[in-house]
Amino acid sequence: MYEQRRNERVNSMFGRVLAAELMKTKRSLVWVLVLIGPLLTSLQMMGIDPSNQVDGMNEWETLYTFSVLLYAMLFLPLLTGVLSAFVCRFEHLNGGWKQVLALPVSRSHVYLAKLLVVAGLLGATQSVFLLLILLVGVVKGIDVPIPWDFLLRGIAGGWIAALPLAALQMWVSAIWRSFGAPLALNVVLTLPAVLIANSETFGPFYPWAQPLLAMSPQEGDAMFNVSLETLFIVMIGGFLTALIGGWWTFVRRDVTA
């Protein structure tokens, strides 16, 4: 009975911390950031001619394949860093971290709630991207059946591939006092992903290239467009490593920092 009540209190406390983080996003322009990447990509989609089909792909698959190149190579990695820095922005202003870390709340709850908000925002971004693909396809008059398995596998794969990058960016954003420094670092590390993604040796291990690899259509029975080794060892393993490292650093930081 005691253990059950203790778990209920812990869950209730985490729920309040998460609700507080969500309230912060409602009062900010973060939802505009969620829309920017997909909307800019939709402008590119309008210039794509789905009738010029890639071998073995229908018009929907062709539209998705050409659209995902710019979106997953540039917008999604950049947005991951922006969102991670943005959810920590309130605490970076006017000594906010001192106030938050001095409150009678678990530091673990604060850190995990912020990361969960970023993951949710990335999921919303992926959903908007999918909706815009469908909208542009309708505008262009594509009348073949929608390949839901093809599209959802790529959308889900991109979200999963962005999580290790989100955990890594959250680690940096939470410990650096500067709001702009994590953003600058993210931009610098995103640009080489264009070249590294083409390397079979280094591409799967470079976090900024993983969204492109996961969202790009692959032949065979790869799960989420990546091999099982890449999914479990690189992506999930990388996420857990960055999560634990960031959490451990955060809970041990000086309250006056």
Image (tube, grey):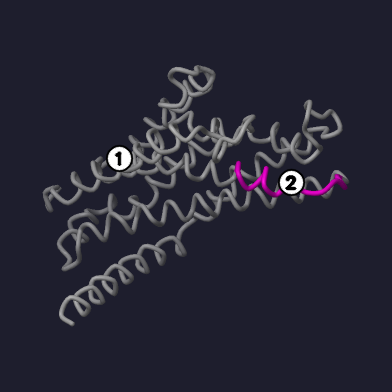
The CA span between labels 1 and 2 is 34 Å
Q: Position of residue 89 (x, y in %)?
A: 34, 50
Where in the figure is residue 22, as x and y percent of width and height? 41, 64
- Magenta segment includes 150: yes
Q: Is residue 58 magenta?
A: no
**Residue 9 in the image, given as x and y percentages of width and height:** 23, 76
Q: Quadrant of residue 74?
A: top right
Q: Residue at x 52, y 52 (%)?
A: 123
Residue plotted at (34% across, 55% down): 114
Dot in front, 1 or 2: 2
At 26% across and 71% down in the image, what residue appears? 13
Q: Which residues are magenta?
A: 142-154
State the residue at coordinates (39%, 36%).
183
Left or right: 154 with respect to 111? right
Hey, what amino acid is under mark 2?
A: Pro
Q: Viewer-proximal residue, 74 or 165?
A: 165
Q: Nearer the viewer, residue 235 or 171?
A: 235
Q: Is residue 145 left or right of residue 224?
A: right
Question: Left or right of 192: which side holds 85?
Answer: left
Q: Is residue 112 left or right of residue 68?
A: left
- Say which element carries label 1: helix
Mark 2, residue position? 147
**Residue ID for mark 1:** 242
The kind of residue on which mark 1 rests is: Ala
Residue 229 location, x and y as percent?
43, 32
Examine the rendered structure and indicate whether residue 2 appears above or below residue 105.
Answer: below
